[in-house]
Amino acid sequence: MAFRYFYLSNVCLAYGLILVSKLWPKTGLLARATIENGFYEVATAITLLAGAIGLGWRWMKLSSSSWQLRLGCIAMALLCFIGAGEEISWGQHWLKFESGEFFQSHNYQKETNLHNLVNPILFSTLINVVLYVGFILYPFIHWVFPKNRLSQLLIEYNLGAYIPPITIAILLMLAHCFHGWLIPQVYSDTAALLGSWSLGLALMLIYKKRVDHPFLWVAMLVCGIGFAVGIGASDIFQRDNFQYEIRECFTALVLVYWAFGWSGLLEQIKP
């Protein structure tokens, strides 16, 4: 539970940075926090590296556990490690080495990383599809219909621990509030976020007896406030890079929290 409030307080702090940037743009606080190798990018890399170390350590301690859990730990540890390296271009800016000829020719940012070898719009679309379908919409479906076919199959094959609870879905929606609301190129993201939030809120109201902790209501309210902040500060979203850097940081936090929950490093996350 402590993580949830830590996360929520940091979301509110980021909203504060946006408002400061809106009211007093000359401070430059938000721009400095979201520049290349700035606070949020480094925080994302540290979060993912911590996830890799924690899950790798957990994998070594699970010699007598099911192969599904051990495979999940080592796979997620590797993904976190790769994600941390990719986030900082494998230390290129700190170590001051030049990109090789291949990356100079094929990388969209001419940096030493793999994810910019793919068209950025395509890459971000694939990531968003996975997050919205697997970590936002599906948790609500499972919460309302726990005996749906997919959930039954996951449980049958001893993969039920990986099903994200609605807490993860709501925390991810909070991360996606940092979004270029009035930028035409991302209107599909806007529709997905508003649709997911509306559906989640409707289901929580219909099945409110299943909502066993007030934090979920508070988080949904803060998410709604985030919509208003984002739309009101849409000019900042178009000027600064924070809609990506902050969103990536909070998304990494949520995914590591989810992995620590099912792996046993933290207490299992309740709905």
Image (cartoon, rainbow, N blue to C red):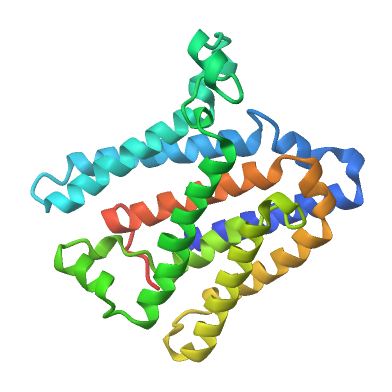
Question: Residue 195 at x, y = what percent?
Answer: 59, 71
Would you say 223 lies left or right of 254 here?
right
Q: Position of residue 271 (x, y in %)?
A: 40, 73
Q: Residue at x 56, y 45 (%)?
A: 248
Residue 165, position as x, y percentages in the image: 39, 68
Q: Residue at x 53, y 29 (%)?
A: 116
Q: Residue at x 48, y 48 (%)?
A: 126
Question: Is 145 in front, or is 265?
Answer: 145
Instruction: Name the foreground residue: 46 vs 69.
Output: 69
* For residue 57, above or below residue 1: above
Q: In which quadrant of the rendered view does residue 188 lie?
A: bottom right
Could you tell whether 185 is left or right of 65 in the image?
right
Q: Classify 167 as above or below 76.
A: below
Q: Residue at x 70, y 52 (%)?
A: 14
In the rendered image, which quarter contains the N terminus? bottom left
Tell which residue pokes out farthest to the left in this image: 64
| Whether residue 136 can be seen here | yes
Q: Please state the total of marks drawn on the protein image.
A: 0
Whether residue 5 is visible? no
> Residue 59, image x and y in percent?
21, 42
153 over 236 or under it: above or below: below
Which residue is nearer to you in this view: 170 or 156?
156
Q: Is residue 126 left or right of residue 247?
A: left
